[in-house]
Amino acid sequence: MVDLLDPCSIVFYGSNVITKDLFFSGHTATVFLGALCLQNKKEKIIAFTAAGIIAILLLIQHVHYTADVIAAPFFSWLCWYFGKTISDF
């Protein structure tokens, strides 16, 4: 188990070390969000493939629950959509 030492979590957890899994997978979400922002089709394909590979490897290594990995692209898309909508406004 990896102890998560996050200075911002003190607000929610006090001085306790977080030993719970965090929803959703930031590993998958970051790469997926980056892929959404790319313009070049080839680069998008490579980035989405990388996000898929990362998701599979996270599941194999038991770093996140399956729901965390599946939810990451949805929340990434949601953030991308809102960001794009606001910037177009």
Image: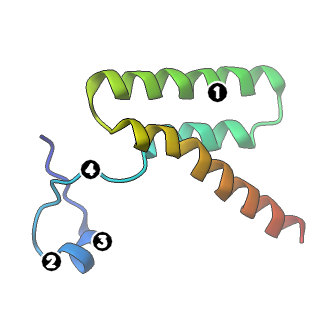
Measure the C-alpha gap from mark 2 to mark 4: 17 Å
Image quadrant in which the N terminus is located: top left
Q: Quadrant of residue 66?
A: top left
Q: In this view, does 52 lie above or below 88?
A: above
Q: Residue 48 carries which label?
A: 1
Residue type at mark 1 is Phe
Q: What element carries label 2?
A: loop
Residue underneath mark 2:
14
Q: How crowded is mark 4: few (under 14 residues within 10 Å), some or many (20 or more)?
A: few
Outermost residue, right side = 89
Q: Is mark 3 on a helix, strand or loop?
A: helix
Q: Nearer the viewer, mark 2 or mark 3?
A: 2
- The answer for how far apart the CA atoms under marks 2 and 1 are is 37 Å
The amino acid at mark 3 is: Cys
The residue lying at 73 percent from left, 62 percent from top is 83
Disc on the earlier residue, 2 or 4: 2
Q: State the residue in front, 87 or 18.
A: 18
